[in-house]
Amino acid sequence: MLATHRFARCAFAALLACCLWGCDSGPDELEDDVPNVVNGTLSDGSGLTVGSASHFLIESDDPGYAGSVTMALSDLAQLCDLINANTISSESRWLSLQLFNSDGTKNLALVPGEYTVGGEGSGAGRFANVSFGKREACDSVFDEATGGTVTVTAWSANGTLEGSFAVSFGERSVSGRFLADYCTLPETEDPPVCK
């Protein structure tokens, strides 16, 4: 049952990421003075230049327990503003990372350390679901990463999420780092408006 709840939260986070974030062609190598960088080739053969990064909490189905944390690297310059306006861009690209820290029966608070892509629902451990998404004319498609790791070096629930990643999408792979600010999700049941 926990795996079903996690899958539902992951699917929601991936859909939300697809609706809210985006990216364009990326750099050939990591730049030391840029906090949010994606290096390599995504599943569609392109790169990603990050305009902004945000993280937010996905509420747990189990009262009293922390849920997962989702972070997005987007080509959009003001991602959190769009999230709060319940608006999505008609053209965008993004990399979404959803992180779980599980004791095998429930989600625990996020902690610094390595999160393995895949394996979620297989018991206790730290897991990541990573997806690449793109939207053209308000139609979204996304691909799930097939392997890799996400490393969290620092996290504050209402502050920043910092770390790095190295993930693969079949034969293609990307690596990079992130320093994402916290973004409050709007309290609405309405689907985002695509503009």
Image (spheres, rainbow, N blue to C red):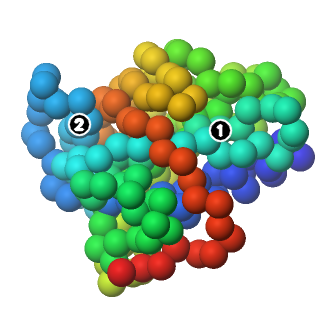
Q: CA distance from mark 1 to mark 2?
A: 23 Å
Task: Residue at the far bottom: name it.
Answer: 137
Mark 1 residue type: Ser
Residue 80 left/right relative to 184: left
Residue at point 30%, 67% (across, down): 92
Please tell me which residue lies in front, 105 or 65: 65
Residue at point 81%, 32% (across, down): 65
Residue 78 left/right relative to 129: left
In what element is the residue under mark 1?
loop
Question: From the viewer's perspective, is residue 143 above or below residue 113?
Answer: below
Question: From the viewer's perspective, is residue 10 above or below residue 193?
Answer: above
Q: Quadrant of the C terminus?
A: bottom left
- Image location (x, y in percent) of residue 122: 75, 33
Q: Quadrant of residue 191?
A: bottom right
Q: Residues within 10 Å of mark 1 (few under 14, many from 20)?
A: many
Please tell me which residue lies in front, 150 or 155: 155
